[in-house]
Amino acid sequence: MDAVVAVLLIFGSFYFAFFIFKRNRIRDQNALDKEITNDFVEEFDLPSSPSEELHPDSMEKLVDWMEDELKTDQTESKDEVDQDIEDLV
């Protein structure tokens, strides 16, 4: 009888730990999504009215544009460095 109670207690503990972990993970994910949305609104001066939600497609386009801009900036800065080196030689 003691063994059955011990096993039930162990399984109950694992279930409780899993439940708490899952709940915290969902809460963290929701908080992260909210923070990312707020960052996009602040960074790109997007409308912050609650009726206009940011769709994942528009956010993906925005991220793609940002990556392209960063690549362009890196290429331009590399070209400038190369030009400066040629000028020194």
Image: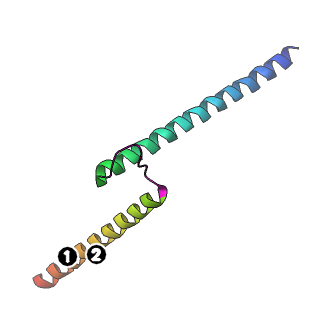
Q: Residue at x 79, y 21 (%)?
A: 8
What amino acid type should be assigned to the residue bearing mark 2? Answer: Thr
User: Which of the image's four quarters has the N terminus?
Assistant: top right
Residue 39 coordinates in the image, percent (x, y) = 35, 47
Residue 42 coordinates in the image, percent (x, y) = 30, 48
The residue beneath circle 1 is: 81
Residue 79 coordinates in the image, percent (x, y) = 23, 79
Image: 35 above or below 75 = above
User: Is 29 placed left or right of 72 in the picture?
Assistant: right
Image: 83 above or below 6 = below
Q: Nearer the viewer, mark 1 or mark 2?
A: 2
> Quick one: SS at disc 1?
helix
User: Is 85 placed left or right of 17 in the picture?
Assistant: left
The residue beneath circle 2 is: 75
User: Which of the image's four quarters has the C terminus?
Assistant: bottom left
Image: 25 above or below 60 = above
> Quick one: SS at disc 2?
helix
Which residues fall within the magenta stretch?
46-56
Q: Is residue 49 magenta?
A: yes
